[in-house]
Image (spheres, coloured by chain):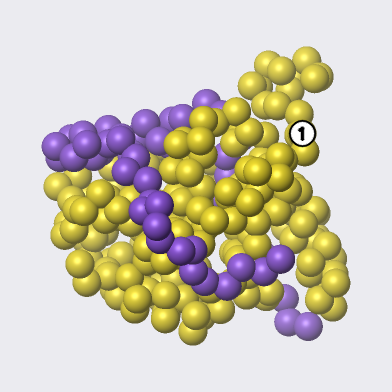
Amino acid sequence: MTASREASGRKERQPLEDRRHTRAARIIGLAWADLPAEHRLLLENIGAARWRVVDQALADCVDDLLRSAGHAPMAPADRLGLVDAVGVWVEELRLVLVDAGHPALVDLDDQSFEMMLARIAWHEWGHALSVVRAEADDVADGERLLALAPRGVSERIRRAGYRRSQFTHELVADIYALLMSRRRRGETGRPPWLDDHIYQFVRRISTWND
Amino acid sequence: MERLTPPKGYTVTTKQDVEEILAIEADLLRSEGVDPRWPGFPEDRKPEGHQQK
């Protein structure tokens, strides 16, 4: 491990165990089954219903898949958007990719691994819904929406270095994943920690009607 | 082929980062009196959807 990598807490990539790879694919399938039926239909219609679990850095994986599908290679600036990514929806390929071998996931216990994989999948499906269904005004409203979000959520989005034009999509993705996780626990309706403006917005984007 | 908006990934850097994400969720759930422990998926449920291999 290099000194800089060690100092940042990042781990070197190791091959993913077959057991974990198989488990990850099962978790994503269960997370999909957990979605409300109308959300699954919507995701089918926008081209976000297919997924692949991989054990490869997503910047390389997406570039390889785009090239093999006849697209131009990704520009270096575009690859930057996938550095350290653990999940992504690639609109051109109509495919959600999850890097189950991401170094940040390898040391998680089985329960945390399941929880995080489900979180990643729900985040990506929420992200896809936002990218396709949010209006230009919604995207422009990202900074204001973020100011209304629970502090921990907004701080993470700001710290992750997303551009302002991505705030709305990242916020919808995170809130959607949180609502799904809450739904898994049998909780529906607007949670008290969520601003009603954001809740109504996510409902509009996702057709959420719980 | 047409190039759409470049894909933007869900960024996580370290295990500590993952733990922070899960801790934020646990705090929110706890704040409304919901048990934050992960209930898991039903063991007898079959995965669904369109996995590409």
Judged left or right of residue A13, residue B32 is left
Q: Is residue A148 above or below residue A97?
A: above
Say which element carries label 1: loop
Residue A37 sits in quarter:
bottom left
The chain assigned the colour purple in the figure is B
Q: Amino acid at mark 1?
A: Gln
- Which residue lies under the disc numbered 1? A14
Query: Where's the C terminus of chain A, which quadrant?
Result: bottom left
Measuring from the top left, give residue A107's x and y in whole percent: 60, 28
The chain assigned the colour yellow in the figure is A
Q: Which residue is found at the position 35% from the left and 35% from the top?
A: B24
Judged left or right of residue A12, residue A84 is left
Measuring from the top left, give residue A145's x and y in whole percent: 32, 55
Q: Which residue is found at the position 72% from the left and 57% from the top?
A: A78
Q: Is residue A67 visible?
A: yes
Local packing at callout 1 (Cα closer than 10 Å; few below 14, some 14-19, many 20+) is few
Query: Where's the N terminus of chain A, which quadrant?
Result: top right
Badge 1: chain ID: A
